[in-house]
């Protein structure tokens, strides 16, 4: 991997099960976050085909076992809007949706991501729901300084999302949003790691 993630400090919080409790990781860099994402093989109980055919609740249950993270700083051990203090990372969830409409026309290949995000540093991880037919990505983008105002975070995240024609989950504009750790259907994790896109 390129060296810039080692030079990007982050406020990393993570947890399992409890959506609000924060376990902070002090002195972390984006490289530490990346190593944590790919260093543990997190696979669901369902195969990719079973996952694609499952209902929403079953899919969510299969993903939650992987735990979650937030790349924001909080005032105490509770993740919520009131305790959010700032972040130097925007995360865009490019999950092939535009509003409530979903389909391959709202997705991006790896090459398309590189083209649209040209000039930015970013790491794009394939999500648990990724497929060759409908690629879905969680895109981590560092910004030049820590953002401490919610309106500014919203504006910057929306500006970045314009590069993807706004085809991102609206939760991407919420700074305290938690995200599932990288995971994959049963037997797919190693292949998914090979799909990661890094922009310099």
Image (cartoon, grey):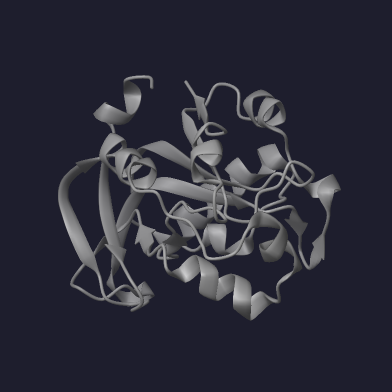
Q: How many marks?
A: 0
Compared with 197, 102 (above or below) is: below
Which residue reaches farthest left?
26
Q: Is residue 146 left or right of residue 185?
A: left
Going 18% across and 54% down the picture, which residue do you hit? 25
* Residue 34 point in image, percent of width and height: 35, 39
Q: In which quadrant of the rendered image does the N terminus lie?
A: top left
* Residue 123 point in image, percent of width and height: 48, 35
Compared with 32, 17 (above or below) is: below
* Residue 188 point in image, percent of width and height: 56, 46
Q: Is residue 164 left or right of residue 20?
A: right
Going 67% across and 54% down the picture, which residue do you hit? 95
Residue nearer the viewer, 6 or 117:
6
Q: Is residue 87 left or right of residue 180?
A: left
Going 38% across and 41% down the picture, which residue do you hit? 38
Residue nearer the viewer, 84 or 41:
41
Q: Quadrant of residue 100?
A: bottom right
Residue nearer the viewer, 171 or 144:
171
* Residue 117 point in image, percent of width and height: 61, 29
Residue nearer the viewer, 82 or 138:
138
């Amino acid at each position: 991997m390129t060296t810039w993630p080692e030079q990007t400090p982050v406020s990393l919080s993570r947890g399992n099960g409890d959506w609000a409790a924060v376990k902070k990781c002090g002195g972390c860099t984006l490289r530490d976050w990346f190593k944590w994402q790919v260093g543990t093989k997190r696979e669901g109980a369902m195969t990719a085909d079973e996952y694609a055919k499952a209902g929403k609740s079953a899919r969510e249950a299969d993903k939650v076992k992987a735990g979650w993270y937030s790349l924001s700083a909080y005032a105490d051990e509770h993740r919520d809007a009131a305790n959010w203090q700032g972040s130097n990372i925007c995360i865009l969830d490019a999950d092939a949706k535009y509003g409530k409409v979903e389909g391959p026309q709202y997705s991006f290949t790896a090459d398309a991501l590189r083209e649209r995000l040209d000039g930015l540093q970013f790491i794009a991880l394939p999500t648990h729901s990724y497929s060759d037919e409908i690629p879905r990505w969680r895109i981590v983008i560092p910004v030049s300084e820590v953002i401490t105002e919610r309106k500014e975070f919203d504006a910057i995240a929306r500006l970045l999302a314009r590069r993807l024609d706004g085809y991102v989950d609206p939760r991407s504009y919420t700074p305290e949003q938690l995200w599932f750790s990288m995971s994959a259907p049963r037997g797919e994790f190693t292949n998914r790691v090979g799909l990661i896109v890094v922009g310099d």
